[in-house]
Image (cartoon, helix red, strand yellow):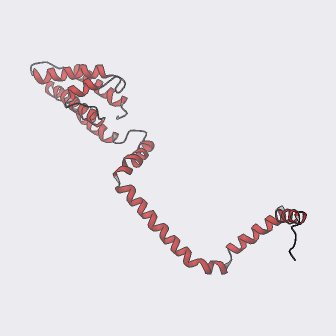
Amino acid sequence: MINSFNASQFVADANEFFNPDNLFYLANKFIVLLISPELQKEIILARIIFLSFSIVFLILIVYFLSTCDFIQAHFLWKLVEIITYKSYGARKYEKEWGKIKAFLDKGTEDAYKIAIIEGDNFMDQILKRLNIPGKNIDERLKNTTAGQIQNIDDLREVHKLRNNVVSDPSITIDFDKAKETLGVYEKTLKLLDLL
């Protein structure tokens, strides 16, 4: 004979099972079972296998993070930026910019001219890295908007001075003019978070 379903008995069993004292008892039994020496002996091989796989995958993750260009560009660079509060590669730019500014310390007119020319060349490299279209710095400056570089008009003016220095060697450049010109380049680099 088939037993009929007794709803009241089902509710009573459910209430007993979900009783907080009973749940605490079951959780305690489960924890004791997990840490029991018998179970630990049974699963030691599985633990060793999973630990080995974990170590292998960790090594693979570190390897791919260090060799994959895409991940370097999007993960490691951002990590460096977060840690240093500067754009990735800013140290390299700072070092290069320091070499250009060192021409001012030489105190000669030729050194000032070289500083202006080198500063302009350096700015051309920066504009290339920003993917501003153009075959040369003249075209790149024309294609740059104030939305991309806030002081683009000043940058265009100092580029004209650089062109004058290159085309007319007899032009005189004093320390103040050279410092002012490099100041425009430096301001641009700071606006771009490269210094």
Q: Position of residue 9 (x, y in %)?
A: 89, 66
Image position of 83 (left or right of 18): left
Residue at the farthest right position: 8
Q: Is residue 175 visible?
A: no
Question: Does 117 appear above or below 48?
Answer: above
Quarter of the image with the C terminus is top left
User: Image quarter for residue 62?
Assistant: bottom left
Image position of 111 (left or right of 76): left
User: Image quarter for residue 189?
Assistant: top left
Image position of 125 (left or right of 30): left
For the residue pair 55 and 116, the one nearer the viewer reads as 55
Residue at left offset 53%, top offset 75%: 48
Q: Position of residue 82 (x, y in %)?
A: 45, 42
Residue at left offset 45%, top offset 63%: 58
Total labels drawn: 0
Question: Does 94 appear above or below 50?
Answer: above
Q: Is residue 89 visible?
A: yes
User: Image quarter for residue 65?
Assistant: bottom left
